[in-house]
Image (spheres, coloured by chain):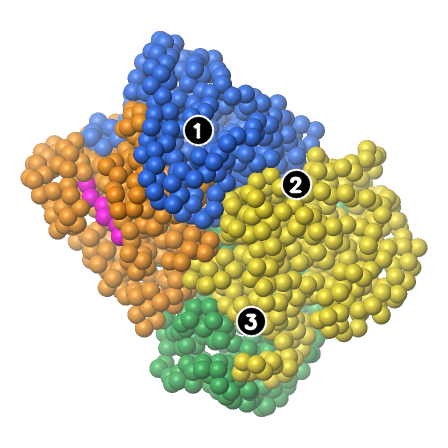
Chain colours: A green, B yellow, C blue, D orange
Amino acid sequence: MSGDTFGRLFRLTTFGESHGRGLGGVVEGCPAGVPLTEDIIQEKLDKRKPGQAGGASTTRKEADRVQLYSGVFEGRTTGTAIGFLVENTDQRSRDYSRVKDVYRPGHADITFDAKYGFRDYRGGGRSSGRETVSRVAGGAVAQAFLAGLGISFAACPVELGGIPAPPASAEDIAGSYGRPFFAPHPDVVPLWEERVRDVKKQGDSIGGVVQVEIRGLPAGLGEPVFDKLDARLAYAFMGVGAVKGVEIGAGFAAARATGSTNNDSILPAGEEPASNNAGGILGGISDGRPVVARVAVKPIPSIAMEQRTINTSGEPETITVGGRHDVAAIPRIVPVLEAMASLVVADFVLLQRRMGAPW
Amino acid sequence: MSGDTFGRLFRLTTFGESHGRGLGGVVEGCPAGVPLTEDIIQEKLDKRKPGQAGGASTTRKEADRVQLYSGVFEGRTTGTAIGFLVENTDQRSRDYSRVKDVYRPGHADITFDAKYGFRDYRGGGRSSGRETVSRVAGGAVAQAFLAGLGISFAACPVELGGIPAPPASAEDIAGSYGRPFFAPHPDVVPLWEERVRDVKKQGDSIGGVVQVEIRGLPAGLGEPVFDKLDARLAYAFMGVGAVKGVEIGAGFAAARATGSTNNDSILPAGEEPASNNAGGILGGISDGRPVVARVAVKPIPSIAMEQRTINTSGEPETITVGGRHDVAAIPRIVPVLEAMASLVVADFVLLQRRMGAPW
Amino acid sequence: MSGDTFGRLFRLTTFGESHGRGLGGVVEGCPAGVPLTEDIIQEKLDKRKPGQAGGASTTRKEADRVQLYSGVFEGRTTGTAIGFLVENTDQRSRDYSRVKDVYRPGHADITFDAKYGFRDYRGGGRSSGRETVSRVAGGAVAQAFLAGLGISFAACPVELGGIPAPPASAEDIAGSYGRPFFAPHPDVVPLWEERVRDVKKQGDSIGGVVQVEIRGLPAGLGEPVFDKLDARLAYAFMGVGAVKGVEIGAGFAAARATGSTNNDSILPAGEEPASNNAGGILGGISDGRPVVARVAVKPIPSIAMEQRTINTSGEPETITVGGRHDVAAIPRIVPVLEAMASLVVADFVLLQRRMGAPW
Amino acid sequence: MSGDTFGRLFRLTTFGESHGRGLGGVVEGCPAGVPLTEDIIQEKLDKRKPGQAGGASTTRKEADRVQLYSGVFEGRTTGTAIGFLVENTDQRSRDYSRVKDVYRPGHADITFDAKYGFRDYRGGGRSSGRETVSRVAGGAVAQAFLAGLGISFAACPVELGGIPAPPASAEDIAGSYGRPFFAPHPDVVPLWEERVRDVKKQGDSIGGVVQVEIRGLPAGLGEPVFDKLDARLAYAFMGVGAVKGVEIGAGFAAARATGSTNNDSILPAGEEPASNNAGGILGGISDGRPVVARVAVKPIPSIAMEQRTINTSGEPETITVGGRHDVAAIPRIVPVLEAMASLVVADFVLLQRRMGAPW
């Protein structure tokens, strides 16, 4: 109920702040026999690392090493709880007196105090971006399970700082992790690099849009009423810090279309309809086509420019948030969104099995 | 797990299809002593009725009368499960042979068959729009509870068939239920009426955008990780049939803004910041300002125009979906979105009480 | 969280009091295609009826007729929520002024007031024995599902008012529903009848022990840590009003045994071990043998003898509880315990399917 | 759903086996501001340690040191997830070839293989007694929270190897942790020591009965239908390995009593009724008196005597289970049962707060 657990049958429970001893989590419900090692998880965590991102991310070194504590025996899952841990190694002692007493605009400082009456002011506590380490590790387990069923996940930014990427083919996207910003198309990279340079110079920050695609999903996943597949995806994505919007398929454009243009034709096996406005989901249930979602990511709220705010006594203050901050949550948010999508899907796969599904 | 239950502490479990004996639900967790009668629920159900909506809705007569079965004694809730029922009275025997064998584009027919291998083909079964009757009734209980805490909900369309409504004041919105389409501003009504007339003539349908506002929410509601307040709202709204997108505060526009323009200033008590780009939520937790969300609603998929599809044997067909269908899910979706928002909030209010919150 | 829902994948949510408009419930998670009609449920409800029980039950006429509202189409479940209703037909207007102001010993009157600060004093509200109607109806759905997998449930009293029944064979037990008290052996019937006559004459009441057996359960059901099969059974049975103890297999006798006498030998397929002290459960997981539990049922607290108590103002009073009360919760509790066992098992069957179990 | 999580609002999720890298868990829902340190948890873990138990426990050295990873700041809980870890330090490399291929009677070896098709055969995997380390650590957090509300837990054996302890006063019980076996009365210690010596000599094992008492509980905890306070306690206790029976208050003796002797009188404030046959629970809800439960613990199944069994190919075998095994699960199970009781109560306290309870 405290919302540290995601999922129903395939479940991830996480703990950890940026300035405690470490972060970790427990994956429950993963079937027995799935090949799993620390290296498989580490590979996903490494995608989250700063530095490879064309200058948008910080230069902090985060040597996140995952350690498996349970649930794996001789390289395969045993079907029982999988505990994992990532130690915090980069907790430099810093001066927090400023953020202790003054609320940063766009951050959760003020709402944490309202909620708990008490706050670990060092680095955002549980609302720190670092919390996503556990999501990526947990999602790696989900992806290891789903890979065996032929289900895969590909997210990439389609817009950064107001500059959209050109339309990208599936092959383009497949190569995105090799490019700065995990860009879907090489041509947009220099444009985004220039945008980031400019914004950095101004001490400001930018947002963007990330597209998430799920391929290989069988038809029939999702529940018809409250727990629609798209509802769970929206829940999963909107629960990631900095996300302010989620759309499925045509999304907000569908609101401006007519039924005759928005409905996707249903064609005989072998023929692919021209459109996928439904984003692979009808009535909340997967229809066997690629599931496509887009996620709006707000600009990083920590900026070097001066902002108006108040202190914990309610008095007016101004604040500039210095330090080693990213200019954009993109691209580091990309593997986090893949992880969340995979947790949603793993959960529905197990849920559908209870109906007798053969996979 | 079948997704017929919404909420954790304040819970609504629903059942019922458009062509069974009736629909109903169970509300659990409502505190004892809340004033509640059938009339209070009926008032919300009546908002869902067709006819008052400027021609966008069907002319079917749905005399939905709610009956309370339990959990209320002498006009107040007892703290135990509240069971309610709405009988189906309009189940004309019709010829379903066509929809039995041919999948309607944009509908869940094909995905239901993929999921269950079996389908009640009369009127969409559990994915029928009629299912929302139970949501509105359940939400009425949540709203009765929250009204006592000074928390209120106001939704209205801000765009229909591509035509946006002019900016509306809080007073304008307060009067929206008295206008056709529940329009937020009187000036847009004739434009929307014309749009609906045109589309109807063509046998087509339209979508729109609905804005949902929550007022009077105390700061501190929402959980910091997976169960952010915005995450639960996105889950709630995206779980309503026809919804394809959800955004909070500035939403997708935030993705194109910079940190300096997107961050809302924090001002001393008494001064209201100029912007509410956060939509009243920081780090997933309410900050005491109005919570604002917008929801993209796709066009009704049932259209009189001919569409390509397949039958249950996989062979190509064409289909035109006649009958008494709405041209738009707006405005009937409006009270449904209010209901879902109220269920989310009632749940978080109870959840926050466990931390010792005094309300 | 209010505890009106039982189960995780196969779920029953109930509502209703003895003096409201009716009782009902929602079954979620039942797979599609299970043969189900009102008659199948009615048959189980009829077992709960008074009159057939050798004088231990009341002579009130409870014509409980179940009505199915949803989730069934053409005699088979559709996989969606199954709503059912049982109207209350026997709500005679009575004088409740006594129970309104004076707490009955052994009843929940005083704890309801402590919990809710408010109480529907007519007939016990939600803690009324009548609440079990919904359990039996929900369990009937579980049993319809499990019958298709060859899993069956047989409960019967093995002790009443201190008088144990003689050892009974499986055949004896199979015929128990045809006997007064659902007695497992014909010889004990006259002894129990005499005991009931005596107690009635004194205005007193008695308890007993019920044995529940589950047959046909495959090995592998149950989870190894908190959600052991026996833990869920204990939870299910202890959650039935009047139950004060639960034991599995040898139970409390195991506490007095040694390992060498308590361990059941494991024998090759075809050979049946002499003992089943484990009661068919090892490490919380079914081992493929019959699951055996015993349940202690306390005497009905409503007695005609004078008892000391207090009124709602805390002043001392005496009370005699007249009216049409049963002398024992046995045998009416028997089908309730079968229902609860079947809900536990249906839940675990679905849960195990997620691991890839073929049934 | 995999049953590694206990609780609804106050939740403990655990992971870990006896032969992995370590065990741990996550506590969610603990309110902010509760004093908590590693020492507070360690004190409870030390009770679980072998050696202090009059010879009934093994002489293995388990230097279990708990480490807090998150959720605590400056000695107080922050309201967010509390992650903790206990490294396994005593994983001697042993020869497991025998238990790998031959099922131990009374153990979960055979049911794990049936469930998962795959088993970590070293030390019982997830069904190892060592798993209770995480329960005790999690329960320590619950007890730290509840201590502030004046709620306390006291468990002690009342019977061992068939030898009951003499009736003990509250003061006797308060001193039980200082005695061998955590015995409630000094007189029974030599009798139990002799019993243990004899059994050890024979290579056999014994069981016993543990009584759990909860003091300081306010009236009103528990939910009236499925989630009765006694139902959750039964679930909690029966979910501990080796437990085969649970009774509340008079328990199985109530089944042999009459209503007039079993009903507890309700007396005005200040006067204490002579009996507590209800065990402090009426209709599933606490009545403000001490809650009393008794738990049947089976003999340790690992015995040096020869037993009949089969190997993983289904062929008959005999087995003697050597090694450093306890003769009884008592007294090491005692702090585990206290922990489980405290988790149940903490959960209900938070749950009751949602109704507006002031504590």
Residue C209 lies in what quarter of the image? top left
Badge 3: few (under 14), some or many (20 or more) residues near its Cα, within 10 Å? some
* Residue D144 position within the rendered picture, expressed as x and y whole percent measured from the top left: 29, 59
Q: Which residue is mark 1?
A: C337
Q: The residue under label 1 is which amino acid type?
A: Leu
What chain does badge 1 belong to?
Answer: C
In magenta stretch: residue A81 = no
Left/right placement of residue A285 relative to residue C114 reads right
Q: Report helix, strand or loop for mark 2.
A: strand
Eyeballing the image, is D131 above or below C350? below
Label 1 element class: helix
Q: Position of residue B265 (x, y in %)?
A: 58, 82
Quarter of the image for the C terminus of chain D: give it. bottom left
Disc 3 residue type (three-letter): Gly
Residue D312: image location, x then y, percent: 35, 34
- Foreground of the two, C100 or C168: C100
Residue at position x 84%, y 34% from top? B95
Can you see residue B101? no
Q: Which residues are magenta?
A: D152-157
Numbered disc total: 3
Q: Residue at x 41, y 81 (%)?
A: A100
Q: Which residue is mark 2?
A: B67
Q: Are marks 2 and 1 on the same chain?
A: no
Mark whose residue sits in front, 2 or 3: 2
- Residue B117 falls in image quadrant: top right
Q: Is residue D154 magenta?
A: yes
Q: Where residue B288 is drawn, which disc sits there?
A: 3
Amino acid under label 2?
Gln
Residue C232: horizontal and vertical position, in percent?
41, 38
The numbered disc on residue C197 is none
Residue at disc 3, secondary structure = loop
